[in-house]
């Protein structure tokens, strides 16, 4: 890393090139094709919609910053081509949401891809390290965050927004160069490749409407009838939100769903007594909701349920958590990189059900932590498999 490289990047953010015509995009694409590394970022708005509204795509080779305006240029072919060009490494920071947005808008997932947030975590930084803090850690540069809450779909974009957007991407190529050296020295570059590949797979997997109810907390304490109604309501809401491109909560709130599943009203009048259902939702969907509640009552198909952990399993989580903390201290990484408490609970449930290991515990984690966790679980059992 040279001082001039950082200077060129930050100077590029002061004079970003806004791409608003096809001719401008074609010219930029020629430059992109000459690059080995391109930093990528997106700005989007998601408040009332199911799918995020893309407002801007930032691209930088570390010397120039381009800002692609998807509201001005309706065709995304050139962007899709660069995002999937096998000869150009794309670099994002905390890219899971960006991948979802790009897949929806451009119909592609960037490939090949590196995520610098994950890379930083593999070098001892917090798993949720923001871009601004990563830049400070790597280059001792402070970046303004004053445009974080901008409406990126409102035009025209003002100069401060453009500079902010460009600054979020211009340092990514140099970040990759610095991080790759450190990761290769630590023998962890393969770790990064595995975790990024998992992130790409997850981005390609939409929510399964039949399993949407599993996202609600407290389902392990529900009786079977309530849980079945919850499954019907959650499936309907997921499909309705997707079809109408409305945020789930703007179809019907989580609280309203839970109250409906518990109370199971048999008329619109009874439904009106539930405070958590907005009158607009009641007028639009009241009869449909009653149909769903009735249909759920006559369904006797098997349910997936996440039962609450018993006392033995809760003790097991604590023991596993201690092991994760100890191992992470040995590796000098954030414990969350190895396994969160929720992921440990999934591992325990998989063992109890005889299910395959969760994907998170495969790959490099298998040798580093998973086998140790499984050995710990076995060591807690007696000769007949009891503690």
Image: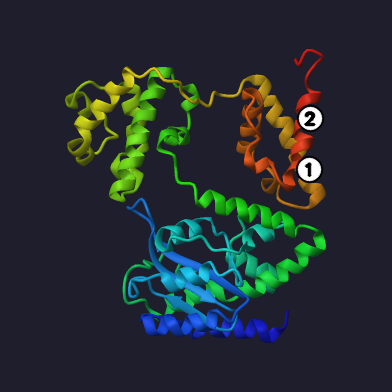
Residue drawn at 70 percent across, 50 percent down: 334
Residue 13: tell me if it is visible: no
Mark 1 or mark 2, earlier in chain = 1
Secondary structure under the numbered disc 2 in the rendered image: helix
Q: Picture coordinates of residue 42 (x, y %)?
A: 47, 66
Q: Residues within 10 Å of mark 2 (few under 14, many from 20)?
A: some
Picture quadrant where residue 54 is located: bottom left
The quadrant of the rendering that contains the N terminus is bottom right
Residue drawn at 64 percent across, 23 percent down: 352
Relative to residue 200, is residue 166 depicted above or below? below
Residue 289: tell me if it is visible: yes
364 horizontally vs 342: left or right: right
Alpha-carbon span between mark 1 and mark 2: 14 Å
214 horizontally vs 170: left or right: left
Residue drawn at 38 percent across, 78 percent down: 158
Q: Picture coordinates of residue 142 (x, y %)?
A: 60, 73
Instruction: Pick whichever, 358 or 379, lies toward us.
Output: 358
Q: Picture coordinates of residue 281 (x, y %)?
A: 23, 39
Please give the residue where the numbered disc 1 appears in the rendered image.
367
Q: Which mark is residue 225?
A: none
Q: Residues within 10 Å of mark 1 (few under 14, many from 20)?
A: few
Picture quadrant where residue 318 is located: top right
Please give the residue where the numbered disc 2 appears in the rendered image.
376
Q: Picture coordinates of residue 154 (x, y %)?
A: 32, 70
């Amino acid at each position: 890393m040279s001082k001039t490289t950082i200077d060129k990047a930050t100077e590029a953010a002061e004079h970003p090139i806004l791409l608003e015509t096809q001719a401008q995009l074609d010219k930029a694409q020629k430059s992109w094709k000459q690059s080995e590394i391109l930093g990528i970022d997106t700005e989007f708005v998601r408040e009332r919609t199911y799918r995020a509204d893309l407002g801007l795509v930032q691209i930088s080779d570390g010397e120039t910053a381009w800002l692609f305006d998807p509201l001005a240029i309706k065709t995304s072919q050139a962007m899709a081509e660069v995002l999937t060009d096998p000869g150009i490494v794309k670099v994002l920071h905390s890219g899971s949401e960006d991948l979802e947005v790009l897949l929806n808008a451009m119909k592609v997932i960037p490939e090949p891809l590196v995520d610098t947030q994950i890379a930083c975590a593999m070098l001892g930084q917090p798993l949720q390290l923001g871009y601004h803090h990563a830049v400070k850690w790597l280059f001792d540069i402070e970046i303004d965050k004053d445009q974080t809450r901008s409406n990126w779909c409102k035009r025209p974009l003002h100069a401060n927004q453009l500079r902010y957007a460009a600054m979020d991407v211009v340092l990514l190529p140099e970040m990759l160069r610095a991080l790759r050296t450190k990761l290769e020295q630590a023998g962890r570059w393969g770790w990064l490749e595995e975790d990024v590949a998992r992130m790409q797979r997850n981005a390609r997997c939409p929510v399964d409407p039949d399993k949407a109810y599993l996202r609600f907390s407290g389902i392990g304490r529900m009786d079977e009838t309530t849980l079945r109604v919850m499954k019907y309501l959650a499936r309907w809401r997921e499909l309705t939100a997707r079809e109408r491109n409305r945020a789930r909560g703007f179809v019907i709130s989580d609280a309203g769903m839970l109250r409906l599943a518990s109370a199971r009203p048999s008329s619109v009048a009874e439904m009106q007594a539930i405070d958590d259902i907005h009158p607009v939702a009641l007028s639009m969907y009241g009869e449909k909701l009653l149909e769903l509640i009735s249909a759920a009552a006559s369904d006797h198909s098997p349910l997936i349920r996440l039962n609450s952990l018993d006392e033995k399993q809760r003790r097991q989580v604590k023991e596993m958590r201690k092991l994760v903390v100890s191992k992470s201290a040995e590796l000098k990484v954030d414990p969350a990189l190895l396994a969160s408490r929720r992921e440990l609970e999934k591992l325990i449930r998989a063992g109890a059900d005889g299910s395959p290991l969760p994907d998170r515990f495969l790959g490099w984690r298998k040798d580093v932590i998973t086998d140790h966790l499984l050995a710990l679980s076995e060591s807690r059992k007696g000769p007949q498999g009891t503690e």
